[in-house]
Amino acid sequence: NRDATDGHCLFDSVRGATKLISSDATTAETTDADTLLSFDSDGFSVGADVKVNTNTEKYVGWQWIEGATPGFDIVSFTGNATGRTISHSVGVAPEFMVVKNLADTDNWAVYHTSNTTAPATDYLILNTTAATADDATIWNDTVPTSSVFSVGTSSLTNGNTEAMIAYLFAGVEGFSKFGSYTGNGNADGPFVWCGFTPSFILTKNIDTADQWGIRDAARNPFNVTDKLLNPNAATAETSSSTGYIDILSNGFKPRSADSNINTQTIIYAAFAETPFKTATAR
């Protein structure tokens, strides 16, 4: 919900419609029959819950298709609190992973290939503003491979006897890219090359406590993009009078000195609209 302080709603076809988890909260999975009603052949259907369908209020939705072509896999597993590997079907080593304990009030654990020079030893938390932290119990200090990813003893990624869900992404030429850049703290930010026109951009400053940020071409059809949502917070959409970024034909460029987009080290996840090698000037 872009207009109200409602929580974010995440659903997937593995867990099924009505099974709700929120990126801004530690809460366990709930069943809400009035949010996402169904996954349909041409979209999805929602109920009357205020988080998804308040009269006259504006919403935005982002969808990914699971499969090797878009470089995305959804993996459900039962934790055992013992360092182990979990099989996946991405086909290459995942570069961006988000894991949530569905049965417990735990944080969302995030792996990013550019989160420090040793990303498997560190992790980020999707539902907070926290900077990166070192913890061997999250990813078992082991980088993912083309067939498995590793989890340690933490309940965030491997709660004993508890249901877990993992979203795994790998870069696909012309469609998705995961990397980092160094901000310069002014309105003429560094150009970030993606090799495609981004439709969705997620950013996080890993060096300090700061908001995660989502900008997209659906809410911002023309440059400069000025609308921001924070997946870690149940806040309404905010806007900047000067804009946040330029979405370009082959990447993006920060147009703000804001610390969540253009100071210190910023990691990003960028996606084109479709997994094809095309780029349209913007």
Image (cartoon, helix red, strand yellow):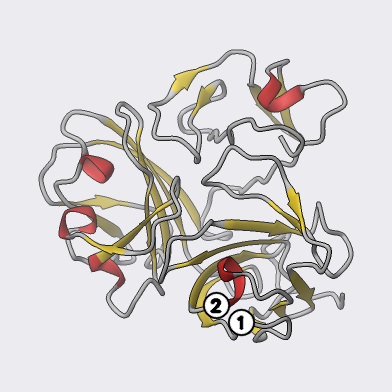
Q: Tag 1's secondary structure?
A: loop
Name above or below for residue 24 compared with residue 113.
above
User: In the rendered view, does 91 fall on the left or right side of 2?
Assistant: left
Find disc 2 in the rendering and name its residue.
263
Look at the numbered discs 1 and 2 and tell me whether their residues touch, using CB distance below 8 Å: yes
The tag earlier along the polypeptide, 1 or 2, is 1
Badge 2 density bin: few <14, some 14–19, many ≥20, Cα 10 Å: many
Find disc 1 in the rendering and name its residue.
185
Asked where in the image residue 202 lies, by quadrant, the reply is: bottom right
Asked where in the image residue 253 lies, by quadrant, the reply is: bottom right
Image point (47%, 33%), residue name: 14
Q: Which mark is residue 168?
A: none
Q: Relative to the observer, which residue lies in front, 214 or 76?
A: 214
Residue 257: where, in percent of width, then height?
Answer: 66, 76
Q: Tag 2's secondary structure?
A: loop
Q: Quadrant of the C terminus?
A: bottom right
Image point (50%, 34%), residue name: 22
Image point (87%, 60%), residue name: 221
User: In the rendered view, does 78 fall on the left or right side of 269?
Assistant: left
Label 1 – label 2 distance at C-alpha: 5 Å
Q: Amino acid at mark 2?
A: Thr
Q: Quadrant of the N terminus?
A: top right
